[in-house]
């Protein structure tokens, strides 16, 4: 029998999966512990003008698909009118079959707007009009979108020099969703460009009130901002790297490397590596002191298209999966912190699916019985945030670790319309367990499985982060 497209039992292939999803997963709120939402828009409770603005401005997944479909840049990141861009997207959607964009697009139309039509050139105008009329109303302000999706907590991604004014405003407003900052200090170790690095340090110096001319001052200034972030409710850090940096170094080496770059001179490769190694370790220590969770996103090969990078800048859809060696340095980094009793709760995300097993086993090395799932293998991220990637991540984690202790899904999104990705993830989880039951590989213990689904969908994250 042919199932109908994206009905209430979407992705649920057995009655066990249907039971687990509808009775246990569906009702739970969302803890979105890593995303890139703009806190300013939450503070202002922005109302978007139309569907194109909220859907297409800033979504590099869609731009990539449109370019691949032969659509000119003008309609992706360019200056075409909103509806023109939307028409080009609608024209592309039928060509996205089997890409997660096809599922996300129609899930979002259903869940937010109650639109059950299929988007294509023929339906573009009516869907645009219907959804835009809704999105332009106060009922669809970004705060109301979050409430509609039962979001309980979101963690944005913020630089140490950010004054967090928007987070503060949201909290003062008494908004029911906790909007918390995340400490993302990548720029504070970006020494490969001496000019921009010094500009950054000057800003850091101003916001911290600490003169930065020695490595110790840099750490002091960062501590100062770390304390400030903590006072604003921050409980997690996040770092985006090709691979962990864990080169041996001495403090006097780091002092002289810092002086060199601070005086505007360019560092060589080994100096950069040593400096970043020192910074990664110091970040780990700072997070441990506060009992924060550290997150490491590893393995993106960014800005591959230099021509379009020059024209459009970063995060416009020209990044891919890298093949960096990640095992040895990750091991060394975690071991050094653990050895010194400074290893805090940690989430490791890999972008290369070939590293799934590596990461799942690496996490196991540093579990110490102090907290269930202390070292997490993070959910399928970016290119892996789709049915196959999510299943493969959970299969690796199940086989080589404890799926039951998994803290579950994040959107990692820039869009307020991305929350159905949690639903998508929960359906896939329930389906995996349902198939195992149907095959007689695990018992049909409704209490055990129901609890497991609820834990991974919500309660594990709640207990792990203690927001
Ligand atoms: Zn992210």
Image (spheres, rainbow, N blue to C red):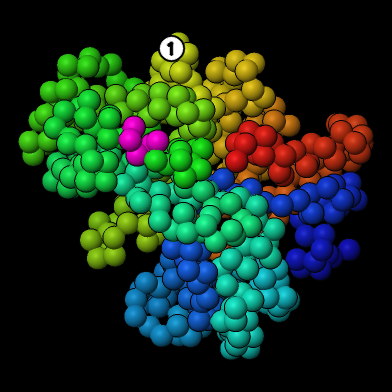
Q: Is residue 224 magenta?
A: yes
Q: In the image, is residue 118 above or below residue 201?
A: below
The foreground one among 112 and 138 is 138
Q: Position of residue 390 (x, y in %)?
A: 63, 45
Q: Nearer the viewer, residue 290 or 24?
A: 290
Quarter assignment of residue 332: top left
Q: Quadrant of the N terminus?
A: bottom right
- Secondary structure of the residue carrying numbered label 1: loop
Q: Considering the whole magenta stretch, tell me its main secondary structure.
A: helix
Where residue 263 appears, as percent x and y from the top left, is: 7, 36
**Residue 345 position by quadrant:** top right
Can residue 344 be seen here?
Answer: yes
Q: Which residue: 79% across, 46% down? A: 430
Q: Residue at x 18, y 45 (%)?
A: 202
Q: Position of residue 276 (x, y in %)?
A: 28, 30
Mark 1: few/some/many CA within 10 Å (<14, 14-19, 20+) = few
Name the residue located 17 percent from the left edge and 18 percent from the top edge.
253
Nearest to the observer: residue 116 or residue 162: 162
Q: Residue at x 75, y 66 (%)?
A: 6
Q: Quadrant of the C terminus?
A: top right
Residue 310, x across and y down, in percent: 23, 61
Disc 1 residue lies near ligand 1 with CB under 8 A? no
> Position of 272 compared to 244: left or right?
left
Q: Is residue 112 above or below residue 315?
A: below
The part of the chain drawn in magenta is 223-227
Look at mark 1 in the image and give the residue it sits on.
Answer: 340
Residue sitting nearer the eye, 338 or 139: 139
């Amino acid at each position: 029998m042919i199932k109908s497209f994206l009905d209430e039992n979407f992705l649920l292939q057995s009655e066990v999966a249907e039971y687990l999803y509808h009775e246990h997963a569906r009702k739970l709120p969302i803890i979105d512990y890593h995303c890139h939402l703009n806190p300013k828009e939450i503070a202002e409770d922005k109302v978007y003008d139309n569907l194109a603005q909220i859907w297409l401005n800033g979504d590099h997944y869609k731009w990539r698909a449109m370019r691949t479909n032969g659509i000119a840049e003008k309609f992706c990141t360019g200056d075409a009118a909103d509806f023109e861009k939307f028409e080009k997207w609608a024209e592309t959607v039928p060509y996205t079959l089997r890409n997660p964009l096809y599922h996300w697009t129609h899930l979002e139309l259903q869940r937010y707007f109650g639109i059950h039509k299929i988007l294509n050139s023929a339906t573009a105008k009516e869907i645009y009009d219907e959804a835009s009329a809704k999105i332009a109303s106060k009922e669809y302000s970004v705060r109301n979108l979050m409430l509609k999706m039962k979001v309980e907590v979101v963690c944005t991604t913020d630089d140490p020099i950010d004054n967090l004014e928007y987070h503060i405003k949201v909290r003062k407003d008494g908004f029911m969703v906790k909007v918390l900052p995340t400490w993302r200090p990548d720029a504070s170790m970006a020494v490969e460009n001496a000019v921009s690095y010094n500009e950054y340090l000057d800003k850091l110096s101003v916001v911290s009130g600490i003169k930065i001319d020695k490595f110790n001052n840099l750490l002091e200034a960062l501590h100062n901002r770390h304390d400030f972030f903590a006072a604003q409710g921050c409980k997690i850090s996040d770092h985006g790297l090709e691979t962990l940096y864990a080169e041996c170094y001495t403090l006097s080496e780091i002092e002289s490397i810092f002086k060199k770059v601070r005086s505007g001179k360019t560092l060589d490769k080994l100096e950069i590596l040593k400096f970043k190694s020192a910074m990664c370790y110091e970040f780990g220590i700072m997070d441990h002191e506060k009992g924060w969770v550290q997150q490491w996103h590893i393995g993106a090969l960014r800005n591959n298209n230099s021509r379009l990078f020059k024209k459009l800048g970063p995060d416009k859809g020209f990044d891919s999966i890298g093949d960096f060696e990640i095992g040895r340095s990750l091991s060394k980094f975690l071991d050094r912190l653990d050895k010194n009793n400074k290893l805090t709760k940690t989430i490791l995300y890999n972008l290369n699916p070939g590293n799934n097993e590596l990461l799942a086993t690496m996490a196991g090395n540093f579990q110490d019985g102090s907290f269930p799932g202390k070292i997490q293998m993070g959910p399928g991220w970016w290119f892996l945030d789709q049915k196959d990637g999510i299943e493969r991540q959970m299969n690796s984690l199940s086989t080589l670790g404890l799926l039951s202790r998994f803290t579950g899904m994040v959107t990692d999104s820039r869009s307020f319309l991305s929350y159905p990705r949690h639903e998508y993830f929960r359906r896939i989880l329930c389906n995996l367990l349902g198939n195992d039951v149907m095959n007689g590989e695990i018992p049909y213990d409704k209490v055990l499985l129901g609890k497991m689904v609820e834990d991974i969908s919500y309660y594990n994250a709640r207990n792990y982060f203690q927001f």
